[in-house]
Amino acid sequence: MVKKNKLLIIGAGGHGRVVADIALKMNIWKEVSFLDNNDNIKPFMNCHVIDKSSEAIKYIDDYDIIVAIGNNMVREKIQTSLESEGASIPVLIHPSAIIGEDVEVGKGTVIMAGVVINCCTRIGRGCIINTSSSIDHDNIIKDFVHISPGVHLAGTVEIGKKSWIGIGATVSNNITIIENCIVGAGAVVVGDIVEGGTYIGVPVRRL
């Protein structure tokens, strides 16, 4: 689908402002605006809240739309609804990110400053690849995953749908983490995670 020259960001909180900053640095869109239910949010770098989040559908003919909500399940619900209505949903990549050869990135994913993604990796729809994280070769990151700042994934790692890898966590090579898991801040994963839940520690244990 051909990109529009205006971008609409759903969510004007902290994550949304980082997404706006990336969009502005990409220098693709002539106008960047927000949708948010909070009427008291001040403009950010001349990006204004123009309507409620629930009104996104009426803008799909004129705007590219990106969902900037940190909660994986909420982000999935909104993006899937927009896709069913034919919305144009871009990929946002900070100019400082390093992306290797043969890397696929699904629509609605945001890749933030300082990220390194090495070759032959597949990133799904609606993911957050947060600041200064690294994803090595041959990884598979399923839809609506959040990779937090400073996370390091070694080679041939698979992260299941809607899982959240906390800030500073490390995942060793050849590891699979199933869907709907939370890996806590600073945790170290050295074996497959095959049961949903929250995992913390070095090495991780299930809470």
Image (tube, helix red, strand yellow):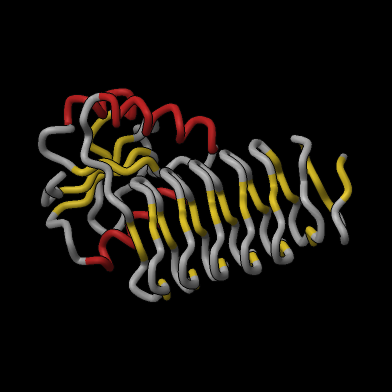
96 to the left or right of 188: left
For the N terminus, the quadrant is: top left
Q: Is residue 43 above or below residue 69?
A: below
Q: Is residue 177 above or below residue 86?
A: below
- How many numbered circles does the render carry? 0
Which residue is nearer to you in this view: 141 or 82? 141
Residue 34 position, x and y percent, is: 29, 42
Residue 19 position by quadrant: bottom left
Residue closest to the eye, 61 or 154: 154
Residue pictured at 35% horizontal, 34% vertical: 36
Q: Does residue 106 appear in the picture of this structure?
A: yes
Q: Is residue 57 above or below residue 72?
A: above
Image quarter for residue 196? top right
- Is residue 17 visible in the rendered structure shown here? no
- Residue for point 46% across, 56% down: 122
Q: Position of residue 48 (x, y in %)?
A: 25, 45
At a point 62% along the width and 43% down the height, the residue shown is 163
| Residue 128 horizontal side relative to residue 159, left or right | left
Relative to 3, 75 lies left or right: right
Q: Quadrant of the C terminus?
A: top right
Name which residue lies at 34% across and 47% down.
107
Between 101 and 106, the residue placed more toward the observer is 101
**Residue 3 x, y percent position in the rendering:** 15, 49
Pinpoint residue 59: horizontal percent, then vertical percent.
Answer: 17, 31
